[in-house]
Image (spheres, grey):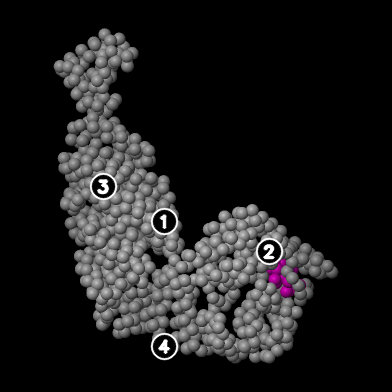
Amino acid sequence: MDVPLIGRTAELERLRAARTAAAAGSGRLVLVSGDPGIGKSRLAAAVAAESTVPVARGYAVDDPGMPPLWPWLRVARDVPGLADVLRPGDSATAQFTMFADACDVLAAAGPLVIVLEDLHWADQTSLRLLSHLAGEISRTRLLVVGTFREATGPLAGLLRSSESIRLTGLSRTDIAVWLRTQEPGVDVDTVASRLSASTNGNPLFVRILMERKAFDDPSAHPELRRLVLDRLPHEARGVLGAASVLGEEIDPPLLQAVALESDVDAMLDLAVRAGVLRSVPETATLAFTHALVRDAVYSELPPSQRVVLHRRAAEALEKADHCAAGRIAYHWRAAGEPVHCVRWARQAAKAAIEALAYDEAVKFAQLALDNAVDSQAELTLELARAEFVAGAIGPCLEHSLEAARLGAGRPEIVAGAALVSRGVGDVKTVAAVDRLCASALRLPQPDAVRAQLLAKRAIAAVDTGANLRAQELSASALELAEASGDPDALMDGIHARHFTLCAPQFLAERMALAYRACELAEQARQPLAALWGHLWLTDAAFQRGDLSEVDHQLGQIEQFASARGHLLARWHLIRARAARAALVGEIPQALAHNQEARGIALRLGSGDAAGLGYAFLNQISIMRGAIDRATGEAALALLRGMPELVLVRVFIPLTHAMLGETEQAVATFEEFRHMPETLQIGPRWAPTVFHIGLIATMLGDVETAERVYRCFSALEPDYGCDGSGPLFCAGSTARILGELAFTCGRLDAAVAHFETAIRMNAAISARPYLAVSRLGLAKTLVAQGESLARAKELLTGAAAEFRLLDLPGQLAAADALLAKISTAARNSNPLSRRETEVAELIAQALSNKQIAERLVLSERTVESHVSNILTKLGAANRMEIASWSQGALGGGQGR
């Protein structure tokens, strides 16, 4: 009995509409999900059967040995040219190229309906190709219909770029309609209610009960698997048992080699007639009518018979030209042969890594370890390596430590465990890896390995604040790596050396290291070598204020990210774009880039990377000079739960200060006040001291401001960024020197620093910081009691910019200072309102006649006002009136 298409009218109409849209040039991806037996395949088959354009079908199978891209290889039989491009390479670039080529072939084949079934069993590479196609499908004439059970992993991500249909059980009314067409003699309403209650509307279960005519008491048949088995032809049970061992789909030649019976073809024909098997026209093979049928058959096999059949399957697959290592490994495991299982599982893990199917690599590496009778240390290390490339950092660390424990005293194992993870920066992982490195260095190691271990120890030393020790270790690592001639060791040495020199003082050396990294990219076996080089050059360009070079390097990073489809590179690119946009005042774009970067960080599974998104928002708040209460409290809650790094903790008093909570700010700032004199120069030194100085200026802490001023005043002004990555660029460092000098009462020095900051920020069009520098200079001029006219001019321009850029805190400060100047001018002004207006116009070099016309007065009245002004001011002539107006009234610009 076929499952009728009952109760799916709305779903079928949605698919028809999608097919119509695709035919008109607006392609669609529709994912149909639901429990086993719910009717997913039946719905997909219905829309395919109605199609007037070609249909291509593919499917995944519940078989660990299924090769990568199997569903697409099935589709390729009906799409000319597709098979030629489905060739995974040994790099991310090759895979990206394959995806692009495959999408081009599929797009050219339209109009076309593609049905992909059982995607919950699909390999990661197949799903990534589908994800790639989803991004372009709207510009094609393709309708892709995929079926799956539950959305996990990449499938969940695909749901965001597709239309989705979730099938649920049939209603009692639907079952009643079905009964009327198949069993007209029964009490339809009563039976429909019973079937609905006992099956939850699952069409497959309903069909089985209807075939058994279990109408009177469906609850007497709770074990539907038993009902499946009752339908099996007795003569074919042996052949079907062998088939269930091989999987849901049946490969007749392989079954011939595995089955214990001889008349395999006849038994298969019998099973088809009984409705246990169905033909698969697109492959000219057979398959179980449902996974539940196969599961039921397999569960009934006696354990001894299972062992025999799995052994025969493994041996047959080993002899076949198309054998898959993973599939063979699982059969050997089920056959109770762990040695053979481990051998094939290791081969499968290696092949999966070469195919960039990292999740599968972890699965097979775990299978090898689970069945190992010896070599546990090597197998644990292989699992850790697979987990690292798959992004499972926590398990990778655990297995690295376990491998070192199991291989204690063996130099290659301990060193291998220490060197598994690269570029992972969370404190816990770095500390644990450092202990592994120390253990490995106590054993005899080749120079290249020692260099790599020393490089890791240098990076770890930074997290303890031992920056000088880190620089010594990185220098030794680089020297040893150069002597070894090993490009990977040299890249590790360069990386560590650059990291330990992340401070403004080491710009030239960092740039030289960055260029070397770019040159080494083609030699080292580290695909990210070029990325690091271009990132370091980007940061150096920010520090120099060379935005043309910043843009050039970001273009290089974009090419790298696009060519390799590398998500980490994309994250670095977007993060740097956010910093550049904020620097020049493109704040909405900066916030949009930051949001995108945070989304990528979450996809990477990196909490530290996601946390940098919040740090960026803190810097925007500092730029704006204001933070709202809700944001500030959320920031404080987040900061208290973040790693115990000084650079993180310093934002706690900073946030309190921005919220106006002075007492809390002073209390939480106490631990940082003497740090500028004790912190070692190196990574995080510059941003930590910078923010300590910023808080000191906000709180009016003269002593701390003096300490920070002494640290920075010896350095040539630049644009910040110390080599650790352009999270944010706050314009010329001369500005913070001006703020520190002002707080310390060094007003003449402050004027000089602010003048420098204005020139430097203007040179790179850093609009927010140019305006803030003008505000700082105006504040200093007012404090000196000099050049009030210039101060007013600076403030007027700065306030206009603050309004345009939406910097409310800075605008409030500018407005308050303007009001102060106006109040002072009024208090010291002996002239009447009209006389003041006349004096301001004299300052603009207007004649009496012009003043009379401007103020709508007679010329004689103006002459009288001029005479009174000369008397009140004790001035000798109009020039002295103009001079007084410019000084006391702010240049004749109005009060």
Q: Which range of residues does the magenta coloring cover?
A: 193-210
Decide which of tag 1 and tag 2 comes sooner along the chain.
Answer: 2
For residue 393: magenta?
Answer: no
Q: Earlier in the sequence, mark 3 or mark 2?
A: 2
| Element under disc 2 | helix
Q: Which amino acid does the dot numbered 3 rest on?
A: Ser
Q: Which labelled disc corresponds to residue 597?
A: 1
Of tags 3 and 2, which is closer to the observer?
Answer: 2
Secondary structure of residue under mark 1 = helix
Which residue is the site of mark 4? 374
Task: Tell me the distance, in whole angstroms, between the alpha carbons under discs 1 and 2.
Answer: 40 Å
Relative placement, left or right, of 122 versus 292 is left
**Real-space Cα separation, disc 4 to disc 1, in angstroms:** 45 Å
CB-based contact (under 8 Å), mark 2 and mark 4:
no
When asked about the image quadrant of residue 143, the answer is bottom right
Q: Which residue position is annotated with label 3?
A: 732
Contact? badges 3 and 1 (CB < 8 Å): no
At horizontal 26% and vertical 14% (from top left) the residue drawn is: 848
Secondary structure of the residue carrying numbered label 4 = loop
* Residue tagged 2: 48
Relative horizontal placement of residue 2, taking residue 122 as reference (left or right): right
Does 209 lie within the magenta span? Answer: yes
The residue type indicated by label 4 comes to: Asp
For badge 2, the amino acid type reads Ala
Q: Amino acid at mark 1?
A: Ala
Q: Residues within 10 Å of mark 1 (few under 14, many from 20)?
A: many
